Image (tube, helix red, strand yellow):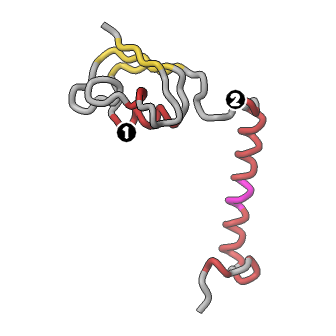
Amino acid sequence: HRSSASMTSDMLPKAKKSRLEGKLDKSVKSKNLKQSFFDEKETYLCTGMDVFLNKEPCVMCAMALLHSRVRRVFYDESNPECGGLGSIRRIHCNKKLNHSFQVFRGQ
């Protein structure tokens, strides 16, 4: 019994092989579209972008914003139950992480 990792494309049934090739074609077209849309120097997610929110994001969403490399986050309402940008945690101020951003809370 062979593992699927060691199978070659010649071993795949024709129907499965054509589905895989179709997915590959879609992936390549999508990648080419993205490359033509974004400047190569600015392709890292949301670099330099500002985010405007009604409510302070939770810790998980605050970390997603950090990973997206946003520049600034503006929010109006605090989230005392699970806020990640000031109410409970301050994810954006953690010196151990490789990115930080400014946060502004409305009055």
Q: Nearer the viewer, residue 8 or 89?
A: 89
Residue 36: image location, x then y, percent: 78, 35
> Vertically, is 95 above or below 15?
above
Mark 1 and mark 2: Cα distance apart in space: 25 Å
Residue visible at 70% across and 53% down? 26
Residue 27 is covered by the magenta coloring: no
Tell me the magenta residue range.
Answer: 22-26
Residue placed furthest toward the bottom: 1
Give SS at disc 2: helix
Residue visible at 52% across and 31% down? 99
Give SS at disc 1: helix
Q: Which numbered disc, 1 or 2, marks the residue that appears first in the sequence? A: 2
Residue 25 is covered by the magenta coloring: yes
Residue 7: image location, x then y, percent: 68, 81
Residue 93: image location, x then y, percent: 41, 27
Dot 1 alpha-carbon crowd within 10 angstroms: few under 14, some 14 to 19, many 20 or more: few
Residue visible at 73% across and 79% down? 8
> Vertically, is 60 above or below 54?
below
| Amino acid type assigned to the residue bearing label 2 in the image | Glu
Residue placed furthest toward the front: 95
Residue placed furthest toward the left: 81
Q: Which residue does the numbered mark 2 point to in the structure image?
A: 42
Q: Which residue does the numbered mark 1 point to in the structure image?
A: 60
Quarter placement of the C terminus:
top left
Residue 30 falls in image quadrant: top right
Quarter placement of the N terminus:
bottom right
Q: Nearer the viewer, residue 61 or 13?
A: 61
Residue 106 falls in image quadrant: top left
